[in-house]
Image: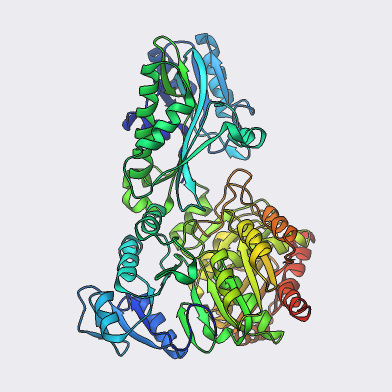
Amino acid sequence: MSILVDGSSRVLVQGMTGREGTFHTERMLAAGTTVVAGVTPGKGGQTACGLPVFDTVNEAVAATGADVSVIFVPARFAKAAVVQAAEGGVRVAVLITEGIPVRDMSEAVAELGLDEGSVAGRPFVLIGPNCPGIVTPGGCNAGIMAASLFKTGRVGIVSRSGTLTYEIAMGLTRAGLGQSTCVGMGGDPVHGLGFQECLELFEADPQTEAVVLVGEIGGDDEERAAAFAAEHLTKPLVAYIAGFTAPPGKRMGHAGAIISGSSGTAAAKAAALEAAGIPVARRPDETPALVAEALAAI
Amino acid sequence: MDLFEHQGKELFAAAGIPVLPSWVVFTAEEAERAAAELGYPLAVKAQVLTGGRGKAGGVRVVSQPEELAGTVSAILALTIKGRPVRGVLLEQGAAVMRELYLAITLDRHAKAPVLIFSTRGGVDIEQVAREDPSALLRVPLDAGSAGCGEQRDRVVAAAALGVAPLDEQLGDLVDRLWTLYRERDASLVEVNPLAVVGDPVRLVALDSKVTIDDNALFRQPDLAAQRPDEDARERAAREAGVTYLTLDGDVGVLGNGAGLVMSTLDMIGAAGGAAADFCDVGGGARAERIAAALDIITSDDRVRALLVNIFGGITRGDEVARGVLAWLEKTSTDLPLVVRLDGNNADEGLRLIAAAGIDGLSVTLSAQEAVESVVAAAKNGGRA
């Protein structure tokens, strides 16, 4: 088991014929992911990366049974691509594109009703934007992460950062702790799946025995996740937060990583997590030991 | 992108949001010409991209022409919270009867904009939120809708201005602010204070704070062209496709991925050092981009030691090592440089750097070791 994607996932790639789309489709295929189709409007009937290309998600789903879409289209077309994925019938869309206007994402969430109902029952789930994707080691690599860094196991990871996910997954693997699924939820202020929804999914997944949450400055997703975990999560949770030394008012690379006035600080997030009984690593390399401890205490 | 007060007020005026006559000037001579048009008394306001300018002496009222040049020169010379003053706004004086607060910003959790109103305007709104949260009215807006009738009515009711023409003006102002927020891709439009002024009695926006979503600048070309001048290194980095921010310390930092770089800065802080910059070369950086980023980081003469922290996913450790070695060959820097490589092709990268045997260049697989050694080198005055 795993969450959202696994060895039976059939992946299509929106924007597969573009430079990034082609590069990453080849990497996903090399990692053993079942990629079945590409979608590029106006290029239906062509072949790319050895796969059929369709004009629309609808056609690709009908012809190939795809249930996951990875989206690489340019920022200005991203909202339309998400709407097409939702209406085209895939269950999960992974929006890799960076630089999408916040207004477009807010409108997509409102128009598609993305946050309505519990995550397990939703017909469509968006991961991202500005995210590295989702990996179920040995099963499915939907996105741009380096699959070779992950190993099958029982720790779930949900993260706002791609490279830190690598760092922490590699640390876990070296400590003999593989991963069930790793979700990179992205660094933008308005995004699809959040911490709380991923915790709900990991809670329900029998393979996952512990979860690592990797947060950063900006917003209050971590505080809300802490409150949710205290109430509803029976599995151990360990956190790492980046940005303790970040100055207020500066965007630290990710559009959403900004301390606004006095809100969104790493200290406030760590305090909320610790108050909920969730250990917070001070450095990425402290995470594996905290996870091992939490697992040993079960 | 944060706009200066005068830029925000130009947007307000174009959107039909009332502002007082004003003029932005950059010298005392220009100020005298502008004052002749505007008349006295005048508010003289520092144009600076940070809050708290009032407390820092950046806002003064001038009633006499002979006080003007001295006041303008003094304000132009200020640095407020580390930010230089870029011009002053001269604004016609007005008799303020009441100060309100009105803003629209993004509610990240709701993933939608929110209208915020308070009758306690003219003060730091975060302080109001702490002292008396009930004094803030927060009304969610519908991202998908151009109208905001219901939200407007709630603000007008909460304001309880008690005069029908003012109620009507406030409602109209809320509508216009929402249109401005949507159409200009703002992430913040704040009017604090929104003042009731006399003679005739009316509402005017006495200050403006506007932030435009950087990601939407492609469809706001007129605003993109007005980008306030940024730090020269930050501009060079943007042109080189690298994310770079100047910070306060002396350890130059280069890494891949925003989260990893933030984490590196924290580790440097915990080890008793301070980073001079935040520099993210992104995924898949080739040797040329690494070298360009190192050029930008080391053009800051506060930098005493350098740390390259790469966890390769798509980025290849050997490519990074080649970039670092090529840069060293071309620059002849004597700054101590610590390279930490892990992940994709890290072994080959570590081997290449070790084999080069360059003085002052060390290499490790451990981020913590790298941080300790670079902080020690910076403390040692830039000697390894």
Position of A99 with respect to A222 (left or right) is: left
Viewer-proximal residue, B103 or A121?
A121
Residue A277 occupies quadrant: bottom right
Look at the picture and state if B131 lies above or below B245: above
Image quadrant holding the C terminus of chain B, namely: bottom right
Position of B341 with respect to A191 (left or right) is: right
Q: Residue at (68%, 62%) from the top-left corner?
A: A230
The x and y percentages for residue B118 are 53, 30
Q: Is residue B180 visible?
A: yes
Viewer-proximal residue, B231 or B175?
B175
The x and y percentages for residue B185 are 38, 47
Q: Residue at (47%, 82%) from the top-left corner?
A: A141
The x and y percentages for residue B279 are 57, 62
Look at the picture and state if A214 lies above or below A55: above
Position of B79 with respect to A76 (left or right) is: right
The x and y percentages for residue B247 are 63, 52
Position of A167 with respect to B378 (left or right) is: left
Tally of numbered tags: 0
* Scheme of image coloration: rainbow
Q: Is residue B25 visible?
A: no
Residue A19 occupies quadrant: bottom left
